[in-house]
Amino acid sequence: MGATYFLDGVPLDHPAGCWRLKKGTKRRPLPGVRSVALSVPGRAGDLPVLGLDHEATALGLALTVYSSTPSGADGGAEQMEHNLEALGALLGTRHRLMTLKWVTGTIVRVAGVTVEAVSEPEYFPGAALAKLTAVVKVPGVYWRDEADSTWAGTLPGAGQIVTPLAGSTGPIVDALLRVTGPAVQPSVRDVATGGTVAYTGTVQAGEHLLIDCGTLTAAVVATDTWDQAGGTDVTGQIQATGPGSAFRWLHLTPAMAVGDPHSRAVLVDATALGTSGASALMIRGRRSYL
């Protein structure tokens, strides 16, 4: 399959030819970086500012609407109007994020998007077709895998490769961490950035500490679950350090192997006191892509 998009499960290259994407709009754009310039007197140039976040991405999807019926027959100008209405209804969703899926071959990436604007359709009555462009915004910047993966590590353990997240090109900002006790003051550190999230309390044997880096919440539960509901809220006992830690928790960031841009891995260090053979660390998340 060539590169194409699906919006809320609807193919933008319609299988019956009701509408098609312009070939030049079929590649995902790369996000820009939120720039900051900091200069001081007596020093040439600007001071380097590291760890800058990416800007929200926008892309234009140019579509041609044809006169084909959903079964593939030619319905003339009237069917073209029906197709234009159907496409307009799809692009008109404003009350929620829509799911945009990008597919090429076996590669699948998804992102939550909003349709920012749709151009006035350009009609070609003699050919019974119309052209329009939809401007789509990815507020969260990053494209993701469709489903979560779970990784089991060791506690304590240094330089552990989170294998399901290998191949990412962007940071995973919403990972779920689960620490199984016994563990006193457990912490997890992202090797690439040096960012750390730590619990100042104790996870008893048979308990699990659940840390949601996306919602900035944490709880201790006594059952084998990833759900914080019913657990004891310990959000106030979580400490984050490292870049950006004043307003976010652990960002798992892929590091490129020396001289090999095809080798990208997420590495973590895990520490804790008072551990036993039952102590464990698990991470659940989806790969992230620029």
Image (tube, grey):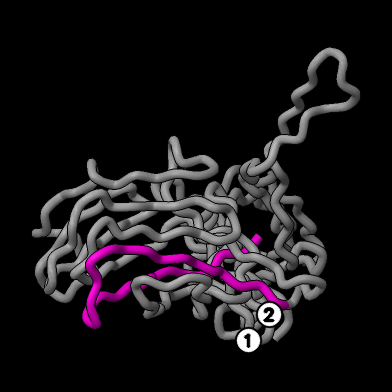
State the residue at coordinates (64%, 45%). Answer: 54
State the residue at coordinates (74%, 77%). Answer: 262
Q: Main secondary structure of the magenta part?
A: strand
Q: Is residue 89 visible?
A: no
Q: Amino acid at mark 2?
A: Thr
Q: Secondary structure at mark 2?
A: strand
Name the residue tied to disc 1. Answer: 106
* Residue 1 sits in quarter: bottom right
User: What mark, if any, has residue 153 been given in the picture?
Assistant: none
Q: List x then y, in percent, for residue 279.
A: 25, 75
State the residue at coordinates (68%, 38%). Answer: 34
Q: Amino acid at mark 1?
A: Thr
Q: Nearer the viewer, residue 104 or 36?
A: 36
Q: Nearer the viewer, residue 186 or 16?
A: 186
Name the residue tied to disc 2. Answer: 104
Q: Secondary structure at mark 1?
A: loop
Q: Which residues are magenta?
A: 263-290
Point out the residue furthest to the front here.
274
Report the side of 116 relative to 223 (left or right). Answer: right
State the residue at coordinates (33%, 49%). Answer: 215
Q: CA distance from mark 1 to mark 2?
A: 6 Å
Q: Is residue 142 visible?
A: yes
The answer to whether 100 is drawn above or below residue 162 in the figure is: above
Few, some or many residues within 10 Å of mark 1 (<14, 14–19, 20+): few
Q: List x then y, in percent, for residue 264.
A: 66, 72
* Residue 109 sits in quarter: bottom right
Magenta stretch: includes residue 270: yes
